[in-house]
Amino acid sequence: MELMDINLMMEITPLLIKAAWITIDISARGLFFGFFIASALVAMRSSRFFPIRSLARAYVSVVRGTPYFVQLLLVFYGGPAIGLRLDPFTCGVVVGAFNIGAYMSEAIRGAIESVDSGQNEASRSLGFGRFATLQHIILPQSAGLMIRSIGVLAIILVKNSSLVSIISVVELTYQAQRLIGSTYKPLEVFTLSALMYIVIIYAVMGLVEFLYRRATRYTYL
Amino acid sequence: MTTATTDTPMVELKGVKKRFGDLEVLKGIDLKVERGKIVSIIGPSGSGKSTLLRSINNLEEIDEGSILLDGVQVNRPDLKGLAYERHINHIRQNMGMVFQHFNLFPHLSTLENVTLAPRKLKGMDARSARDLGLELLERVGLADKPSAYPNSLSGGQKQRVAIARALAMRPKVMLFDEATSALDPELVEEVNQVMKGLAEEHMTMLIVTHEMAFARDVSDWAMFMDGGVVVEENTPDRLFTNPDQERTCHFLRKHLGNQASAQMPS
């Protein structure tokens, strides 16, 4: 007796690949919008105005203090009560973006603060303003650390995307559950879907490494 | 605002006070640097000499007094927010600052380190900036290193690039904050040579240093600071060989060693 039903695995692979694209799509969009949310939060955290700084800090605390799963259910099922009706895919993207945005803002802030304060002083002493210093001096030097940290968050986002199956987005995990319902072969189906997650995550890691090397190439020159 | 004339001191400090919390690190400093002159500030660690230099560049905001660069007030308590930032950025473009730890931009080549500010702040085109950068690198003896990155340079080379970077903005005054303190002894001389070159070109300079021989050699005026006050100031010959104050004597004796202290009154 064979350990696994290879024929079945071949048969369901196209269906799982299609669902994997949904996983990639929802994660990529979440990461994209999350980056803008994170950037806004970083700007708010460095504002001269205390209420704006506090608002950003409170937002990050709330997001970090609650599970992603609960946030997802709250927005999808609780949202309509306050007039927020989102289709499952959009809800997955929005909650993913706002969730990862909070973590990403901390990663970006940490990377910016890791740059030696002498760099800021040297730039300011030449006559560069705060924004120009950030643009020309601080961001290029913090990019490497930022990319690595965002890469870790991207991996978390891909894995967390499996939770959107609870609101019926037909992504990789949801599709796997549906296939188990019709094939009764959980070992084959989950093994295949796990392999697909690994492929996606290794692709993300490869991209992160490539971008990291580009951003820090001056250290090898 | 005062209008600058040739008689206007290039840098003038009047009653400058600076506190860090309860600690008063500058206790009312008065100072004048005439254009084309070189003033050295010596003193023990914690005497306030670096804070003084950083205050001139507004890297530290002073609590009292006034600082003028070529007749223009640097500290402007009447300006707030963006207006203040714009004013300070403009002032800083006229002052070159050289730091103890070089603070070169590691992600840029030496040429880019030198040309970044003129390109971005003065709108200089790439070719002119490159010509200027190469000229300045040649002046500091690094004409062969325009493409090198800071991490491949020695400390002395880094500091020379930092000087070229500051010169690229064509400053009215150069501020040196212990420019050779972080260097190995054999690398100090190459940086001192560049500074001597600037002195010969009559660049106005304010130098905070531990290099007593160098300060004596190049300066037009020397000041000894301790405990946030100027204890004594004089011509370098007088200050280094025949100081009036016991505190100055004591400090110099420690720093110059037996040979020099033998010349001093006990």
Image (cartoon, coloured by chain):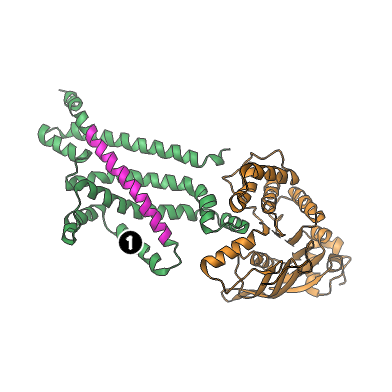
Chain colours: A green, B orange
Establish if A191 lies above or below A92: above
Secondary structure at numbered mark 1: helix
Q: Where is residue B220 in the image (x, y as percent from the top left)?
A: 82, 64
Residue drawn at x 57%, y 63% as measured from the top left: B86
Q: Which one is in front, B249 or A25?
A: A25
The image quarter containing residue B150 is top right
The amino acid type, in three-letter code, at marker 1 is: Tyr
The image quarter containing residue B91 is bottom right
Q: Is residue B100 visible?
A: yes
Count all numbered tags in the image, as a single digit. 1
Residue drawn at x 34%, y 64% as measured from the top left: A58
Kindly give the residue lying farthest to the right in the view shown.
B263
Q: Which one is in front, B207 or A64?
A: B207
Badge 1: chain ID: A
- Residue where numbered disc 1 is placed: A59
Residue drawn at x 53%, y 70% as measured from the top left: B80
Q: Is residue B256 left or right of residue A169?
A: right
Q: Can residue A103 be seen in this view?
A: no
Location of the C terminus of chain B (image quadrant): bottom right
Q: Give the range drawn in magenta.
A: A17-44
In magenta segment, residue A123? no
Q: Position of residue A127 (x, y in %)?
A: 60, 58
Crowdedness near tag 1: few (<14), some (14–19) or many (≥20) residues, C-alpha within 10 Å: some
Establish if B161 lies above or below B17: above
Location of the N terminus of chain B (image quadrant): bottom right
Q: Where is residue A14 in the image (x, y as percent from the top left)?
A: 21, 29
The image quarter containing residue B20 is bottom right
In magenta segment, residue A27? yes
Q: Where is residue B39 in the image (x, y as percent from the top left)?
A: 77, 64
Q: Which one is in front, A145 or B66?
A: B66
Q: Is the magenta stretch mostly helix, strand or loop?
A: helix
